[in-house]
Amino acid sequence: MDISVVVPLYNEAESLPELTDWIRRVMGAKSFAYEIILVDDGSDDGSWKVIEALKAQHPEIIGIKFRRNYGKSAALNVGFEAAQGDVVITMDADLQDSPDEIPELYRRIREENLDLISGWKQKRYDPLTKTIPTKFFNAVTRSMSGIQNLHDFNCGLKAYRKEVVKNIEVYGEMHRYIPVLAKWAGFKKIDEQVVEHRARKYGTTKFGFSRFINGFLDLLSIFFVGKFGKRPMHFFGSLGVISFLAGTIIALWIISQKLYHISYHIPYTREITAQPLFYIALVAIVVGFQLFLTGFIAELVSRNAPERNSYQIEKTV
């Protein structure tokens, strides 16, 4: 199979017939062997009935329905597991991504031997309340990830070699940073392609302001997991040792200072327990011990953690 098109969706019943017809026209014009995987993320607007009707008419369509809403990352992860194509294309279901981009994305993945191509919507039809935070997060992500050649990490229209989607795990709201996940997994041939951004034709956006806060927290998670996910003791243990040593040194200094005063009969104005440094030392020692213990426990958990992604799938067609 040449291409798998993975489409996560939530309450997009109106756009699905038009979207799938458009994809089928593009694929037929190029004689691709393909499949369209529609992952219904717990829609309550009749999207699943539309998917079942489309499946009855077109066998190349595969439908997966979640029992409840898990989020876009969960839908993508399950879609990636089901994909069989040599190249996997992801796009949103709201018709803001153009299927006409698929042949060029496929060509570049195959001919240029790229691992991942991320779309770049130079001209956007979004309000400033969305575009300005997006530019900020993209700039921060470029700086932290070292992937300097991407302008839009969160574009829904992307192309992957099959090996990439089979070796990354997308959870939480990590779909915003899939290029970073791919890089941490060892897939470094990453590029971008300018793509068309179309005005929304049906419905309204499903993402609110909270996505910016969640996105920032997930960005921090990615870099922590990427650097220390397999060796948490290196992170927590290092902080714990530094804190413990700092507290111990301060405590020894206070004790030695008092012993010096006692041995030379020098009067001292305050008891050890009356000094702020005593409590700073005490806190540093306790925190250092706790951080070290946290690193040890995290090390055990990382070695025995079960699969992170487990979702209730109600139906498949």
Image (cartoon, rainbow, N blue to C red):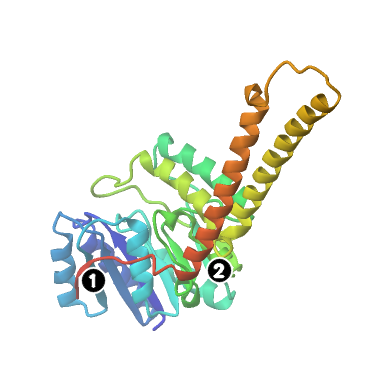
Residue occupying image coordinates x 57% and y 64% = 184
Q: Nearer the viewer, residue 220 or 195?
A: 220
Q: Nearer the viewer, residue 116 or 164?
A: 164
Residue occupying image coordinates x 29% and y 57% = 70
Q: Residues within 10 Å of mark 1 (few under 14, many from 20)?
A: some
Vertical relation: 222 (above or below) 250: below
Q: Is residue 148 visible?
A: no
Which quarter of the figure is the C terminus placed in? bottom left
Vertical relation: 276 (above or below) 37: above
Place of residue 100 in the rendered image (x, y in percent of width and height, measured from the top left): 40, 65
Q: What residue type is disc 1 on?
A: Gly
Place of residue 135 in the rendered image (x, y in percent of width and height, measured from the top left): 52, 42
Q: Residues within 10 Å of mark 2 (few under 14, many from 20)?
A: some
| Count of number-bearing discs | 2
Label 1 vs 2, first from the N-terminus: 1
Q: What residue type is disc 2 on?
A: Ala
Which residue was labeled with disc 2? 185
Q: CA distance from mark 1 to mark 2?
A: 28 Å
Place of residue 96 in the rendered image (x, y in percent of width and height, measured from the top left): 35, 53
Label 1 or label 2, whichever lies nearer to me, is: 2
Secondary structure type for disc 2: loop
Vertical relation: 137 (above or below) 232: above
Q: Is residue 168 visible?
A: yes
Residue occupying image coordinates x 45% and y 40% = 131
Q: Specify the label residue 63 is tagged with.
A: 1
Would you say 197 lies left or right of 50 here? right
Which quarter of the figure is the N terminus placed in? bottom left
Vertical relation: 117 (above or below) 286: below
Would you say 316 lies left or right of 269 here? left
Place of residue 312 in the rendered image (x, y in percent of width and height, measured from the top left): 24, 66
Q: Specify the label residue 303 is tagged with.
A: none
Secondary structure type for disc 1: strand
